[in-house]
Image: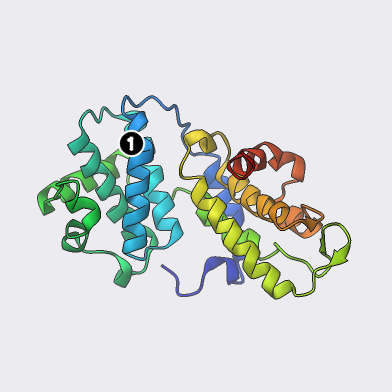
Amino acid sequence: MMDEPWWEGRVASDVHCTLREKELKLPIFRAHSPLLKSRRFFVDILTLLSSHCQLCPAARHLAVYLLDHFMDRYNVSTSKQLYTVAVSCLLLASKFEDREDHVPKLEQINSTRILSSQNFTLTKKELLGTELLLLEAFSWNLCLPTPAHFLDYYLLASVSQKDHHCHTWPTTCPRKTKECLKEYAHYFLEVTLQDHVFYKFQPSVVAAACVGASRICLQLSPYWTRDLQRISSYSLEHLSTCIEILLVPLFR
């Protein structure tokens, strides 16, 4: 993992283009798993574990992606197997996306209340075997873009000096507005993990929609700026359906 975040580097635009190319090759999620009804529960477990281990959002989102697509392709028939695959996905994703000193040890994972309360323990042999199975299932390619890979790049252009609040007054402190918008955007980013409906959209669309939904919540005008359209290549029309889905829980 690079010391400098890619979205702050000189080649950020090139990295973004490469991620956009890679997302076009992602497999279609078919929602065929017989254990799909348990998905929300295991996503919550992965979220809690990643938070406990202070993993980066990219690792968390990659872990959920691996779990979803593995379940979609292979017959994971028991709860024990699903626990094993879920934890293995998280550890594998953390090794790929996070700093080496942030990668949790198996003992650390096993000792959490989250797993001990479920009376689940993963052995090293089970972990190694499942990690190998996962790597083979994904052809040893874990460079799989998720919305978390795009969000910070789009946040660079999320607030402008020309923004107005409530369609009238200019924003008084763009820095504070940007901090608040970032919190909203990361909230929406986590919302996208909860429902597999977001696989209908490309990851970059979901990330851009998180920014758009955040601007709407903060009542920033316009809802989508020229800078955001330039950096993402998306218009508000491209994002409207995804934004609507993101905002539904807030307006129930």
The picture places residue 223, in percent across and down from the top left corner, at 77, 52
Number of callouts: 1
Dividing the picture into quadrants, the one containing residue 241 is top right
In the displayed orientation, state which residue is furthest to the front.
252
Q: Can the viewer see residue 209 in this picture?
A: yes
- Identify the residue under disc 1: 70
Dividing the picture into quadrants, the one containing residue 182 is bottom right
The picture places residue 133, in percent across and down from the top left corner, at 23, 41
Name the residue at 42% across, 63% down. Answer: 56
Indicate the secondary structure of the residue bearing disc 1.
helix
Name the residue at 59% across, 71% down. Answer: 8
* Protein image colouring: rainbow
| Quadrant location of the C terminus in the rendered image | top right
Q: Is residue 122 left or right of residue 14?
A: left
Q: Can the viewer see residue 142 in this picture?
A: no
Does residue 77 lie above or below 249 as drawn?
above
Does residue 220 lie above or below 201 as drawn?
below
Q: Residues within 10 Å of mark 1 (few under 14, many from 20)?
A: many
| Quadrant location of the N terminus in the rendered image | bottom left
Residue flagged by tag 1: what amino acid is it?
Phe
